[in-house]
Amino acid sequence: MSNVKLKPCELLGEVTAPPSKSAAHRALICSFLAGGGEVAPIIDSKDMQATEGVINALKHNEDTLNCIESGSTLRFMIPVAAALGRNVTFVGEGRLPERPLGEYLKLLPEHGVEVKSNGGLPLTISGKLKNGSFRISGDVSSQYVTGLLLALPLLEGDSAVILETPLQSKPYVDMTVKVMQDYSVDVTETDFGYLVHGNQTFDKINYRVEGDWSQAAFFLVAGAIGGDVTVSGLDADSTQGDKKIIEILQSFSANVTAGKQDVRCVKSSLKGTVVDAKDIPDLVPAIAVLAAFSDGETVIKGAERLRYKESDRIKSVVENLRRIGADVAETTDGMIIRGGAKLHSAKLEGYNDHRIVMAFSVAALFLDGETVISDAESINKSYPEFFDDYNSIGGNADVF
C-alpha cells in the first residue's frame, strides 16, 4: 500500500478533465450490445478495467465475472447478463461484496431468473430475464434503474420500470437515457418511471466519451480556495449531474467562469452554505474540503448512500477533517462544517477510497506543513493520472 506526501503549494494553470467513467461504462455496454463500435477515449482505471473485463468474459462465454471494486459494473451488468440468458457468477474485491443488491434479489426471481446470493457477492444467476413491470425503490441507488434500462430493450416484449419512491441521483439515469439514444435505443420517461419497448437494436457507432465533471471538481475547488485553475475538455451541455459543481461553487461565493468547454476558478472569499447532495453524492468529499476553508457554517445533507461507497464516505471525510483541525459534526445523512478553525497538516487516512485521497490532496495544498495520506494507489480506481495533473500545475505530491 502506497502513501502520498504533499507540501503546501499554489495550483496555477490548466488541466484537461479525464474522460467520464460514468459515460464510458454506459457506452462500453451499449457497444457490446451493438456487437461493435469504438468507445474512446477511456482512462485506464480499475473501474474501466472492470467493465471491459466483464464484457470480454461474456464475449468468451466465461462463467465468472469479476467486477473488481466497481459498483457501476456490477449493478449495470447483472440485468444485462440476465437479459442475455447467461448462467454466470459475479464476484468482486474490496468492499464491493458488501454493497447492497437487494433490489435485484427481489426483482430478478419475479421475472424468470434464479438468483443465489447471501445478500451480496458472490451472486449467481441462471435463466433468462422476462419482460414486464419492474417495481423498484428510487432512493436506494440509481444504478439499479440504469442496469434495468440497459437490459430491457433486449427482451421480447415491452417493460415498465415503476419507481415506488422518488428517484435520487436522477442525472445519472438521464445520462443512461442519453447514451442509449446515441445508440438508437429509446427509453420513455413517464409519470410512473420509464417505459422501454422490447426487441430494440443497439446501433454500431464510434462513441466519443466526454470529460468527467466529478474529477474536474477537485481542481476547481483548489482554485477557489487559493489558486487559479482552468479545467478544459468539459461539455457545458452534459447530462452529468456533477456539472452542478459550478452552481455549488457559486453558492460558496467562489469566483468561477464557465465556458462551453472549460471552467476557470480563482482564489475567492468563500462563505458557507447549504448543499443538498441527493443527486451529486460523488462531489461531497470535494465540497467538504471547500467548506472547511470557508467562513461560516456549511450543511451537507441528503448523502446517506455515501455510507456504502468504497468507504463510509461520511465518516471518512469527517474523521480526516477533524485530523486537520476542522470543526465538523457528523449527521445521519451528511455533516455540518463550521469554517474558520485554524487548520494544520496531519497524517490522514485514504480509506482505500479514491475520492477521499483526491479531496484531501486538495486540502493539503493549504495546510501549514507536510501532509501524508495513506492508500494513495486507490486513485487508480478512477483517475490514475491525478497526481501527474496535480503536479503539472504547481502541486508537490510524492507517492512512496
Image: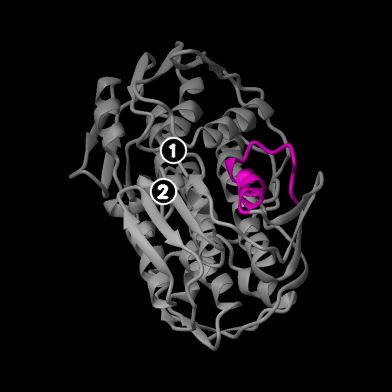
Q: Secondary structure at mark 2?
A: helix
Q: Residue 350 location in percent, x, y?
A: 42, 72
* Amino acid beneath label 1: Gln
Q: Residue 340 location in percent, x, y?
A: 51, 69
Specify the quadrant that holds the N terminus.
bottom left
Q: Residue 388 location in percent, x, y?
A: 67, 74
Label 1: how many Cα within 10 Å (few below 14, some 14–19, many 20+): many
Q: Is residue 363 above or below residue 126?
A: below
Q: Secondary structure at mark 1?
A: helix
Q: Earlier in the sequence, mark 2 or mark 1?
A: 2
Please name whichever residue, 284 or 57, is drawn nearer the observer in this view of the structure.
Answer: 284
Q: Is residue 400 above or below residue 301?
A: below
Q: Reply yes or no: does residue 243 show up in magenta.
A: yes
Q: Reply yes or no: does residue 52 show up in magenta.
A: no
Q: Is residue 8 above or below residue 194?
A: below
Tell me if residue 371 can be seen: yes
Mark 2 and mark 1 residues within 8 Å of each other at the beta carbon: yes
Q: How is the image coloured?
A: one colour
* Amino acid beneath label 2: Gly
Q: Is residue 266 above or below residue 260?
A: below
- Dot 2 corresponds to which residue? 71
Left-right relation of 235 to 284 = right
Tell me if residue 33 can be seen: no
Q: Which residues are magenta?
A: 233-252
Query: Residue 171, labelled with which disc?
Result: none
Please name whichever residue, 28 or 8, is drawn nearer the observer in this view of the structure.
Answer: 8
For the point 61% across and 37% down, the residue is: 31
- Dot 1 corresponds to which residue? 143
